[in-house]
């Protein structure tokens, strides 16, 4: 049994094309998990290092939350936009949080059960960002 599994694994490796490391790295930087972030190098006093690292961590967390909220909102508008936004102009609202909150409340009020669940999920994400 074990020999058969090993042979199957080896044959899988042989079928898979080998991608050069430089090409993999380039693809990761363009399409990977941190593709929308940039590397920054700054010179600061040693005493401020932890403060800068904490600030960078907060900025990454906020960026991730905003990106996730935008994805949820885009999906909701793709599925329910015409039904829930009859008299609402989201473009007039100042930021993603307010746009998401208005769309979520409209989904809860005017949508079906699935729209209600998506609206609650979006409102939960909006309230997470406030804390």
Image (cartoon, rainbow, N blue to C red):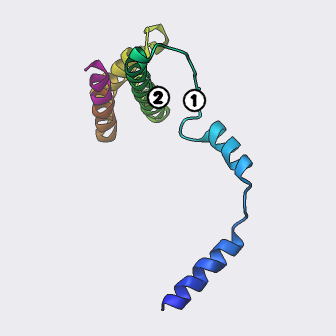
Residue at 70% across, 41% down: 26
* Residue 91, x across and y down, in percent: 49, 12
Query: Mainly helix, strand or loop, the magenta region?
Result: helix
| Residue toward you, 119 or 124 | 124
- Mark 1 sits on what residue? 36
Residue at 63% across, 43% down: 28
* Residue 30, x across and y down, in percent: 66, 37
Residue 86 visible, this angle: no
Q: Which residues are magenta?
A: 124-131
Q: Secondary structure at mark 2?
A: helix
Q: Nearer the viewer, mark 2 or mark 1?
A: 1
- Mark 2 sits on what residue? 67
| 16 lies left or right of 86 | right
Q: CA distance from mark 2 to mark 1?
A: 10 Å
Q: Count the marks: how many?
A: 2
Q: Which mark is residue 54?
A: none
Disc with the residue nearer the chain's start (2 vs 1): 1
Residue at 28% across, 40% down: 113
67 magenta-colored: no
Q: Are marks 2 and 1 in contact (CB under 8 Å)?
A: yes
Q: Is residue 97 above or below residue 117?
A: above
* Residue 9, x across and y down, in percent: 58, 78
| Residue toward you, 98 or 82 | 98
Mark 2, residues whose alpha carbon is within 10 Å: few (<14), some, or many (≥20)? some
| 26 lies left or right of 73 | right
């Amino acid at each position: 049994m074990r020999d058969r599994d090993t042979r199957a694994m080896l044959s899988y490796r042989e079928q898979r094309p080998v991608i050069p490391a430089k090409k993999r790295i380039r693809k990761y930087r363009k399409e990977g998990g941190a593709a929308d972030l940039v590397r920054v190098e700054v010179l600061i006093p040693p005493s401020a290092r932890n403060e800068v690292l904490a600030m960078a961590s907060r900025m990454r967390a906020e960026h991730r939350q905003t990106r996730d909220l935008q994805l949820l909102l885009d999906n909701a508008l793709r599925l329910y936009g015409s039904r829930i936004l009859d008299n609402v102009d989201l473009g007039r609202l100042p930021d993603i949080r307010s746009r998401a909150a208005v769309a979520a409340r409209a989904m809860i009020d005017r949508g079906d059960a699935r729209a209600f669940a998506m609206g609650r999920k979006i409102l939960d994400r909006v309230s997470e960002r406030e804390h």
